[in-house]
Amino acid sequence: NALAGYSRNIVSHEPGTTRDAVETRMVLDGWEVDLIDTAGIREAETVHSESEKQGIQKALRAAQFADLVVNVQPSPFHSSSPSHVVENAYPKTICVLSKHDLTPDHTSPEGFVSTSACTGHGIQKLMNLIVRSLLADVANQPELLEGPVPFTERQVRYLKTLIQT
């Protein structure tokens, strides 16, 4: 919700609230990004309901096809958390510690971005990191953004009507 800028998803302190993958389209630094909020990936022995198990399976499938995985863990970070599973399985991963406002004096482990949806702490930094991570190829090969842009005939007709008005 903090990234989207509005209350898009139901949030709760209770683990296992998110079951389905909820997609939100947004623009970050001028780039259109589809963010998919999924069920959290937890250790199998802590999952008690069948619907949560199915939600975790959906999350794993979504991560498999993602260009970037944003792995959010509540602060303070606990070593029993399955974040290492996500990091090892998906090489393009940003690790985030949420709820910084609850533990403001806590130091984040190296490689984590500390955020708070309540105060906005770290949200802009996370947005910038997402864009940089997704556009890493463009930074190394700026010619990818050069040249013609393909348009459909319908888009060309629409653009012509805008020019005429």
Image (spheres, rainbow, N blue to C red):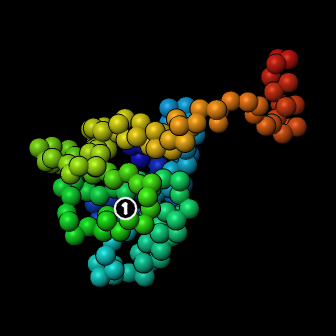
Percent position of residue 53, x then y: 42, 78
**Residue 15 appears at what percent x and percent y?**
31, 67
- Most foreground residue, 13 or 56: 56
Q: Is mark 1 on a helix, strand or loop?
A: helix
* Residue 62 position within the rendered picture, expressed as x and y whole percent measured from the top left: 52, 64
Where is residue 5? Give x, y as percent.
44, 39
Vertical side of 3 occupied by 65: above or below = below
Is residue 15 in sight in this rendering? no
Residue at 32% x, 51% y: name it.
Answer: 96
Q: Which residue is drawn at 38% across and 65% down?
A: 88
From the viewer's perspective, is 8 left or right of 155? left
Which residue is disc 1 drawn over?
A: 87
Which residue is rendered at x = 55% and y = 49% of the image? Answer: 34
Q: In this view, does 163 lie above or below 60?
A: above
Q: Residues within 10 Å of mark 1 (few under 14, many from 20)?
A: some
Q: In this view, does 87 lie above or below 95?
A: below
Write the residue at 59% across / 32% down.
142
Q: Which of 20 and 136 is in front in this view?
A: 136
Residue type of the residue flagged with mark 1: Glu
